[in-house]
Amino acid sequence: RKYGWNPWMVADIAAVAIPIGHFFGRIGCFLNGCCFGRECGLPWAVRFPKIVNQEGYIVGSEPYSFQLSLSKLSGSEPYSLPVHPTQLYSALGALLTFAFLYFYLSKRSRFRGELALWYLLLYSTYRFIVEIFRADPRGGWHSLSTSQWISVGLFALAICLWGPLKKTQTIGNGQTEEET
């Protein structure tokens, strides 16, 4: 506001850029082996390698170490059991979100903040779904992970803000002088 920028316009710009960063972040997670999925027998399941340090101790990868701690592996196997590539599911969700926001919705946006709200709706939806397939240890409450609860909150926030923003942040013919 200090520079005369509408905060919802800035939120829309950020909402289009954030999924690209999220995409590369999740590719990094995949390469690192963190944020891994549950075991599965799907054709696109991935296996992560056993990593041994100089002293001969198994130090990773995270899926391998996790499965070893659950006695699903003996330690002699070179790779983990096949797991859902949840990092790639998230990366795909981020890429599709970017494509929808940038190539489709940015030209059709009806009010400031709409892209940001769509981002919250899409991100919270695919994050909630991807969390179902994750196996890495993380907190939770009442059978939902912390990330799923945050997703529910973000989804609800977007729904609650939709009406007020549509009414006060109109773009185009309905635009008020105050909003320009």
Image (tube, rainbow, N blue to C red):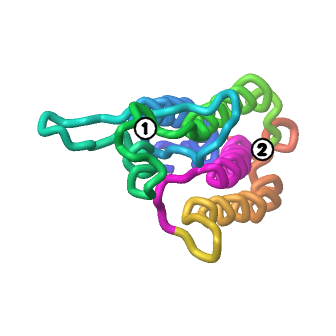
Q: Which residues are magenta?
A: 114-139
**Where does the image place residue 41, in percent across and percent down from the top left?**
67, 37
Mark 2 belongs to which amino acid? Phe
Identify the residue position indicated by label 1 in the image. 33
**Where does the image place residue 138, in percent across and percent down from the top left?**
47, 61
Residue 106 highlighted magenta (yes or no): no
Identify the residue position indicated by label 2 in the image. 111
User: 109 and 65: which one is in front?
Assistant: 65
- Can residue 140 be spotted in the picture? yes
Residue drawn at x 61%, y 40% is 84
User: 99 and 37: which one is in front?
Assistant: 37
Pick the quarter of the image with the C terminus. Answer: top right
Residue drawn at x 55%, y 65% is 146
Of callouts 2 and 1, the N-terminal one: 1
Mark 1 belongs to which amino acid? Gly
Disc 2 versus disc 1: nearer the observer = 1
Q: Main secondary structure of the magenta part?
A: helix
